[in-house]
Image (cartoon, rainbow, N blue to C red):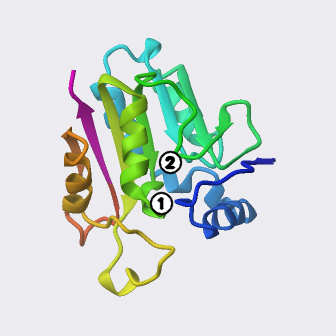
Amino acid sequence: MKLLNSLSPEVKQEVIEYNLAAFHHDAAFGCGNRMAIILYPLAALIQEKSSANVLIVGPRTEDDIHLAKALGFVHSKGVDLFSYSPYIDLGDCHALAYADAEFDAVVMGWVVAYSGNPQLALDEAKRVLKPNGYLAIGWEWLPKSQLNDPSKNRINTVNEVDEYLKMVNLKPVFLNDPDISGNHNKSMIFKKGA
């Protein structure tokens, strides 16, 4: 296991501890298959899957990467604050070490909520996204009674996610189950203009 040595101030200190603790139970692997609500719709939107470069931010394990590859995204890789895998680069979502317009899709499943600066994380995702590329975001909706916990989601509703991404001029093209009371895992996919 390798850990990123230099963290930006936007990374909350409890994030690494929280994620590494997941390795003590099955939450580290698959997380209840929640990435399916992002990756399956993304696979429907992207026609040239076999040539698409996909970056999965904060995958924790290889599970998300292998699911993406199984769906045809053979050029998928991850970036996280820690890694044990050649498929996961060490890096910080607030300062991605990739070229501008390098990826056809950037997937940020259950990541933005833990950022100390969500706008910077989303700006970086947009920077590395190719024109006409897709940004996919997943998050856990929480009741208002749990929103006072600083380790929990800053962005909580579909409207809040949409507002953040309007600021970086990305257009929503997919919304998974906006019914808050029926499903606590949400996802949206946005498209970057040409």
| Residue 72 % position (x, y) | 47, 21
Residue type pointed to by label 1? Ser
The picture places residue 178, in percent across and down from the top left corner, at 20, 59
- Main SS category, magenta section: strand
* 164 to 22, vertically: above or below: above
Q: Can you give x and y, in whole percent of width and height, for residue 76 in the image?
A: 54, 26
Q: Earlier in the sequence, mark 2 or mark 1?
A: 2
Residue at the spot of label 2: 94
Check disc 2 and give the amino acid type: His
- Towards the viewer: 7 or 184: 7
- Report the mark closest to the observer, 2 or 1: 2
Name the residue at 23% across, 61% down.
160
> Quarter of the image holding residue 45?
top left
SS assignment at label 2: loop
Disc 1 target residue: 115
Label pair 2/1, CB-CB below 8 angstroms: yes
In the image, 30 versus 141, the foreground residue is 141
How far apart are the two marked residues, 2 and 1, measured between alpha carbons? 8 Å
Q: Is residue 183 left or right of residue 193?
A: right
For residue 83, side relative to residue 35 (left or right): right
Residue 191 magenta-drawn?
yes
Magenta stretch in the rendered image? 187-194
Q: Is residue 78 magenta?
A: no
